[in-house]
Image (cartoon, grey):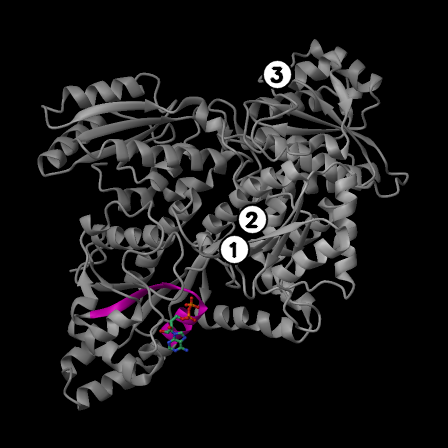
């Protein structure tokens, strides 16, 4: 019988992937299977999407824990996907229902696009009628029909296009963005060598998400998307833009075209046409690259692993808690929170977008895409203008400074700040070498062309962990005055925040330190107040996940246990999320602590597990999880107690975690945060408000708080925020990891 601990006992769940494949489907399938099994349910895969459900036989197979081993890092879907014509017919759906009922399955989890999900709703609405007919035809018994009076389901959206209205991200979109951004980076280097133009065509028949976001992340010159058809004379405008950017110092020109881009008459704008226009107007050779199916392929990004794992877990919880009569939702994300959206409404609103575009109602189409999309379009337009907008009375001298440990994306954020600041009429200054540099007056003006190429990792301005002392504030004040600095944009980590707070709180004694300061979170540790994610954390997570993939592969030939240590100080974000993305069995966090009892249980479990045939074990330990039970200690303990069943290796990943080229997410986060920081400064300069702020991403919106509140949110003993949203993923880890504790 089902109980609170085992709500799945006696229940059978079907899982299928349908429509276009998307990287991240496998992590979702793995999470569904493992969560269902750990809650006592039985899981069946419907191979080749709805077709397997219709065909039955080997098309429907029970899955075990091991069946989904090793698939977390694989692109595509191991249970296959298909565009089933038969499922569009009532007769096909009837055969599918018969196959489900005879196996006792009345709970379905479908991972697919809007087509697959609407098919699911159609199936649900016909269930009672179909069952009645199957009883009349004696395909199933009346008892079988009575035992399964309704089809209960949850839908997960698998689509690289990120086109479903109602959820922030669909499974596969982040990975596709990785592929595209990396291709644009690669093309930029060859284009710059020859001072050449490239037109890059990306997927997105009705949705410009991939095109717009990759154009921002890749610092491209122009973008064409379905939701925002260009003005009638766009060819002239585009070429003027390209010319202006070249004059301002760019060595290449990059135009991104969504495959569904159209003009205002509804005529397609092809990448080939754009290339032709560039060649004609600019009188130079241009190249077209159609990225095609590489955008769909390859290993899922860290986000598509942990987010899809979370979605799979929630989908199982949803279908196990469902009662006959409840209508299943689409489960997605809003902010970093799981959201449940009514399926019919989500599909209807998604399908409305192409209709609105066709009717010329672009504002409404953009509105349905959501606030972040509209904001991104506005930012892109502003980013590509190198020339200073007529400086008005609001023109100020704004200095950019880094502090704290290096975070990938610091450079990108500084470059964005310079370009957006200049376009808003400010003089932008760079402080070299963090707060010591500010004290010593290492400050110089930055022009639009100076930051060309800063999308790579690192921090050209330099960063230091030094927090100034009160005694330093005198010299800092002099330096601020000598350079006539009107505002400080601090892009950095914990120590930078402390430095900014110190200046702000000592402003009565040192009036020059009372200038407006805005802190933008940049730290791989993701331990800053006021932001659920800081610039650099996603990149570090991807670096760790790739390292774990390699470490696991290296251990395949022998029976081996790995203990991998991640950075983060006492904040376990990187450890938990990489444990989820890398498929670890165990994670050690400072937030949870490590006890001797739990280690004894781990050792016993590990020995039994290897004795029963396990080949690989992976534990991730946050670097400061416990001062005594160090990574070295854990590795030795596991080795000592292995009784020859396995050997142990430890991997302290170290500074590679700070060294990645910023991920698309970090680049986009950087530009959003910096843009808002400049908005805030504009308000302060206009006299509307006189505070200093720290800002960040909260539930997917950029929000800011007055500096005076900073300490209230910080756990200064452990150097992390008091509230950490990602701790909600601990039960997910336990469900999918099969470890002792
Ligand atoms: P996606 O799910 O990626 O949007 P499709 O629109 O091609 O892809 O749908 C995938 C499959 O879902 C279809 O081949 C079909 O089996 C099923 N499907 C789609 N729409 C319906 C529908 N209206 N009724 C029944 N099944 C449908």
Q: Is disc 3's CB within 8 Å of ligand 1? A: no
Provide the residue designation for mark 1: 168
- Tag 3 secondary structure: loop
Task: Left or right? Give the position of 484 relative to 195.
Answer: right
Provide the residue designation for mark 3: 467
Task: Left or right? Give the position of 12 relative to 443.
Answer: left
- Give 394 or 359, whichever is nearer the viewer: 359
Pointers 3 and 2 in contact (CB under 8 A)?
A: no
What's the CA distance linking mark 3 and mark 2?
A: 30 Å
Which tag is nearer the camera, tag 3 or tag 1? 1
Provide the residue designation for mark 2: 700
- Tag 1 secondary structure: loop
Q: In which image quadrant can residue 328 be found?
A: bottom left
* Residue 65 position in % (x across, y down): 19, 49
Ligand 1 quadrant in view? bottom left
Q: How many marks?
A: 3
What's the CA distance linking mark 2 and mark 1?
A: 8 Å
Comes first in the chain, label 3 or label 2? 3
Q: State which region is magenta.
A: 105-121
Give the quadrant of the C terminus. Answer: top left
Is residue 229 shown to the viewer in this render?
yes
- Tag 2 secondary structure: loop
* Residue 539 position in % (x across, y down): 49, 36
Q: In which image quadrant can residue 626 be found?
A: top left
Q: Residues within 10 Å of mark 3 (few under 14, many from 20)?
A: many
């Amino acid at each position: 019988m089902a109980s609170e601990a085992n709500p799945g006992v006696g229940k059978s769940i079907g899982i299928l992937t349908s429509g276009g494949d998307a990287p991240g489907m496998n992590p979702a399938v793995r999470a569904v299977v493992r969560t269902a099994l750990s809650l006592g349910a039985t899981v069946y895969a419907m191979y080749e999407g709805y077709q397997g459900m219709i065909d039955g036989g080997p098309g429907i197979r029970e899955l075990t824990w091991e069946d989904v081993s090793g698939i977390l890092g694989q692109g595509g879907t191991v249970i296959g996907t298909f565009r089933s014509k038969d499922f569009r017919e009532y007769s096909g759906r009837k055969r599918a229902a018969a196959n489900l009922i005879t196996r006792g399955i009345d709970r379905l989890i479908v991972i697919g696009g809007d087509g697959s999900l609407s098919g699911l709703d159609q199936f649900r609405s016909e269930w009672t009628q179909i069952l009645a007919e199957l009883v009349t035809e004696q395909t199933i018994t009346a008892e079988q029909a009575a035992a399964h009076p309704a089809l209960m389901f949850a839908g997960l959206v698998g689509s690289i296009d990120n086109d479903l209205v109602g959820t922030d991200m669909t499974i596969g979109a982040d990975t596709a963005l990785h592929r595209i951004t990396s291709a644009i980076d690669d093309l930029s280097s060859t284009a710059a060598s020859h001072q050449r133009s490239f037109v890059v065509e990306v997927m997105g028949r009705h949705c410009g998400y991939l095109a717009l976001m990759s154009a921002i992340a890749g610092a491209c010159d122009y973008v064409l998307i379905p939701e925002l058809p260009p003005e009638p004379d766009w060819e002239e405008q585009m070429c003027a833009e390209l010319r202006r950017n070249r004059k301002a110092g760019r060595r290449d020109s990059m135009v991104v075209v969504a495959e569904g881009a159209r003009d205002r008459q509804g005529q397609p704008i092809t990448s080939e046409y754009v290339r032709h226009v560039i060649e004609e107007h600019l009188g130079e050779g241009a190249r077209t690259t159609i990225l095609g199916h590489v955008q769909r392929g390859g290993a899922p990004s860290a986000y598509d692993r942990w987010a899809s794992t979370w979605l799979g877990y929630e989908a199982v919880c949803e279908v196990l808690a469902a009662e006959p009569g409840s209508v299943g939702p689409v489960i997605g994300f809003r902010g970093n929170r799981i959201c449940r959206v009514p399926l019919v409404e989500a599909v209807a609103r998604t399908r409305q977008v192409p209709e609105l575009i066709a009717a010329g109602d672009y504002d409404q189409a953009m509105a349905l895409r959501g606030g972040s999309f509209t904001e991104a379009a506005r930012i892109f337009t502003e980013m590509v203008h190198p020339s200073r907008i007529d400086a008005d009375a609001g023109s100020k001298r704004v200095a950019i400074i880094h502090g704290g440990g290096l975070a990938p994306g610091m450079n990108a954020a500084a470059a964005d700040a310079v370009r957006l600041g200049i376009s808003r009429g400010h003089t932008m200054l760079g402080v070299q070498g963090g707060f010591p540099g500010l004290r010593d007056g290492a400050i110089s003006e930055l022009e639009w062309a100076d930051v060309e190429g800063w999308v790579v990792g690192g921090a050209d301005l330099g960063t230091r962990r030094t927090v100034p002392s009160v005694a330093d504030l005198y010299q800092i004040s002099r330096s601020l005055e000598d350079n006539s600095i009107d505002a400080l944009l601090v892009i950095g980590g914990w120590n930078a925040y402390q430095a900014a707070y110190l200046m702000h709180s000592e402003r009565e004694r040192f009036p020059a330190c009372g200038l407006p300061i805005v802190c933008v979170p940049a730290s791989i540790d993701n331990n800053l107040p006021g932001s659920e994610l800081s610039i650099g954390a996603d990149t570090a997570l991807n670096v760790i996940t790739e390292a774990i993939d390699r470490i696991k592969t290296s251990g395949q030939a022998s029976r081996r246990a790995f203990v991998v240590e991640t950075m983060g100080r006492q904040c376990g974000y990187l450890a938990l999320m990489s444990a989820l993305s890398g498929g670890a069995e165990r994670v050690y966090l400072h937030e949870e602590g490590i006890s001797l009892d739990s280690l004894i249980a781990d050792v016993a479990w590990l020995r039994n597990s290897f004795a029963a045939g396990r080949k690989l074990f992976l534990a991730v330990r946050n670097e400061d999880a416990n001062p005594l039970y160090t990574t070295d200690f854990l590795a030795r303990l596991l080795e000592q107690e292995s009784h020859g069943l396995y050997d142990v290796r430890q991997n302290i990943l170290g500074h590679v975690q700070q060294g990645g080229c910023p991920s698309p997410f970090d680049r986009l986060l950087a530009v959003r945060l910096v843009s808002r920081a400049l908005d805030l400064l504009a308000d302060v300069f206009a006299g509307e408000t006189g505070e200093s702020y720290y800002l960040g991403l909260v539930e997917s919106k950029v929000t800011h708080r007055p500096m005076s509140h900073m300490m209230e949110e910080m756990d200064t003993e452990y150097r992390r925020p008091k509230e950490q949203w990602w701790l909600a993923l601990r039960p997910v880890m336990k469900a999918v990891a099969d470890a002792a504790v």
